[in-house]
Image: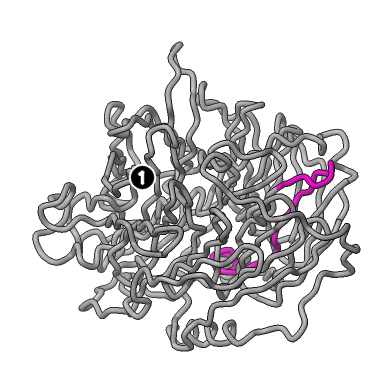
Amino acid sequence: MNKTLSSLALVNALIVPLSVHADDPPSSSGPLKAYSKVTDARLTQPEPQNWLMYRANYASWGYSPLKQITTENVKNLKLAWSYSTGMTEGHQAPPVVNNGYMYVTTPNNQVIAFEAKSGKELWRYKKTIPEELQQLHPTNRGVALYGDKVYIATTDAFVVALDAVTGKEVWKTASADWKQGYYSTLAPLAAEGKIMIGVSGGEYGIRGFVAAFDAETGKEVWRRYTIPAPGEKGSETWPKDDAWKTGGGPVWVTGSYDPETKVSYWGVGNAASWMPDTRKGDNLFSTSVIGIDIRSGELKGFHQYHPNDAWDWDEVSAPLLIDIERKGKKVKSLVHAGRNGYLWWLERSPNKIDFVDAWPFVLQNVFTGIDKKTGRPSYDPARIPQTGKTVNFCPSLWGGKDWPPEAYNPQTGLLYIPANNNLCAEITGIPTGKHKPGELYIGVGLDNILTHVRLTDESRKHIGEVQAWDMATGKKVWTQTFPAMNWGPLLTTGGNLVFGGGTNDRKFRAFDARNGKVLWEFAANSGVIGVPSTFEIDGEQYIAVQAGWGVDAQRMQGAFDAVMPQKTPVPQGGVIHVFKL
C-alpha cells in the first residue's frame, strides 16, 4: 500500500497541464483595480462583498450577509464561468476573494489567481513536491490573505508567502521535516502580523503543533506543541516513557479566532498509534480543542472531547464562535459537531474553556453517558478497540462529521451540519512495532481501514444528511437526507440559503435555510467536496465552489463499493464553478 500511495503522489506531482483555461470565459470588464491590502481591521470586520478567509470570518461561521440570491430566485442561478485546474484528487479549498481578485488552491501545492468576475487567469504558482514524498492526503484547503501577500501551507511542510498581484515567491520557511512524516493541508490563519499553521501526520507518529510565522519575514515567532513534553501541563496523561515524542495530535483545519481576547481555537486530531493500550492515559491534548494566545503561543484553555481515543475520531474542525442565550444569559460559546458523533457546546473565556452541554447528532453506541459538569464521556468497554481485538462501533472512523465545516446563520439562528448518519465500523488492532520516522504508525492494517465500513438496516436507506440545529434549545429543526455519504462543506447566506455538495451524484445544491427544502441543484463534472464561498462585484452576487472528488470521500466510496453489489464510479478532475443569477 505504501508503494501505491507513493506512486499516486508521483503521478499527481507530474500532472502539469500544457494549457489550462477558463471554459469560454466572458471578456474582462477592464483592468482590475489596485489590490486592496488586507488589514487586521478588515479581517475582524470583513466587507460583505468579499470572502477574505477560509470561513469568511474569524468565528468560522461560513456565513455571508449577501442576499441578492434568495429562496425565491435561486432557481435562476446559472454558470457564469468555469475553469479546469488540470489536477485530480481532492479539491477542497474555498475560492477566496478580495475586491475582484480570486485565489484558489488545488492538490499539489498550486495557487491560481483569477479575475473573479471573468475567470481570467492572472498567475499560477506551483511549489515542487519531492518525488519520494508520500502524499497520504493529496489536497490543500486554501490560502490566507494578509497585507499585500497570499500565504499557503504545503504538503512538504513549508509556509510560503506570495505577492498577491504577481504571484512571485516572497519567502518560504520550512515548518517541519517532511521526511519525518510532517505535512500541512490547511489554510493558514492570519492575524496581528502572524501567519499561523498546523501540521498533519498523526498516522506517521509525529508530534503535532501549531506555529506562528512573521507575515513579513517568515521567521518563526512561536510554536505550541499539541502533545506536552514531560513536566508540561498535560504530560501526566501520558505513559512515563517516550510515547509523547510520537504522540500524534495533528492539526488538520484552520483555527477560529477571538480578536477581543487574542485567543485562537484549534481542533486536535488522534493520538498515535491508534490502539489506546499502547499509550495508557487520557493523552492530552489529542482529540481536543485548544485555545492559544496568538501573541505568545501560550495555552489558554482546552477541552478533550474523548480521552484515550481508540476510534481515530480526529476532532479536526475548529469550533464556531457563537453567542448563545441560555436561561437568560448570553454564553460566549464554542460549538463543534464532533467526529465522535456528539454536538458540543462549550463556553470560552480569556483563560479557560468550560463544558456546557453535549448530545448525539448521529447514531452513537460507544458513549454510555456524559458527565454533566465536566463533559467527560464514559465508554462501553465492548466498543473500545485494542491490540489483538476486533471491535465494531458507531459512528465509523470517518465520524458523524469529518473535516467538512459546519455553517452558522445569525439570521435564522441555526447551525447547519454536513453529517454521515447510521454508519458503523469494524477494526482489528495489530501490533505497531517500533516507530520509524516517516513510516506509518497506526496499529490497524491499511486493508482494514479501507474496508472497515459496516452497513446497518438504516444505512442501507440513507447515510448522508444536512442537519439544522437550534443551539439554544438543543433541538433539531430539519434534516435533509441522501442515500449515500455527504462530504459537503456548507455555506449559508443572508438570502436564507444553505449551499453544499458532497454526494456521489456530483450535485451542488441550494437549500432553504429555514426548512431544508432543495431549491436548486447543479450536476458538476465531479463530486463537490470544496468549501463554497460567495462574493459581489459590480452589484452582482456570485456563488463559487470547486468540484474535484478524492481523498477520504473517494476512500469511503471505495469502502461502500467493497460491500455493495453495485459500484458507484465518481469521476475525478478539478473544476472551479462560479454562478450568478
382 horizontally vs 51: left or right: left
Colour style of the rendered protein structure: one colour
Residue at image coords 40%, 44%? 265
Residue at image coords 55%, 68%? 139
Say which quarter of the image contains residue 212.
bottom left
Task: Looking at the picture, tell me which residue is in the foreground, 91 or 464.
Answer: 91
- Could you say where residue 425 lies in the image, as x and y percent from the top left? 45, 58
- Could you say where residue 354 lies in the image, as x and y percent from the top left? 31, 31
Quarter placement of the N terminus: bottom left
Residue at image coords 24%, 57%? 227
- Could you say where residue 288 lies in the image, as x and y percent from the top left? 33, 47
**Amino acid, disc 1:** Val
Determine if the magenta segment contains residue 538.
yes
Residue 457: tell me if it is visible: no
Determine if the magenta segment contains residue 152.
no
368 horizontally vs 478: left or right: left
Residue lying at the far top in this picture: please name it.
328
Would you call the spot at circle 1 few (<14 residues within 10 Å), some (14-19), or many (20 or more)? Answer: many
- Could you say where residue 12 lies in the image, as x and y percent from the top left? 59, 82
Residue under circle 1? 289
Look at the picture and state if 315 lies above or below 70: below
Secondary structure category for the residue under label 1:
strand
Say which quarter of the image contains residue 559.
bottom right
Look at the picture and state if 505 lies above or below 444: above
Task: Looking at the picture, tell me which residue is in the foreground, 225 or 113.
Answer: 113
Task: Looking at the picture, tell me which residue is in the foreground, 244 or 291.
Answer: 291
Residue 148: tell me if it is visible: yes
Looking at the rendering, the stretch of residues picked out in magenta corresponds to 534-556
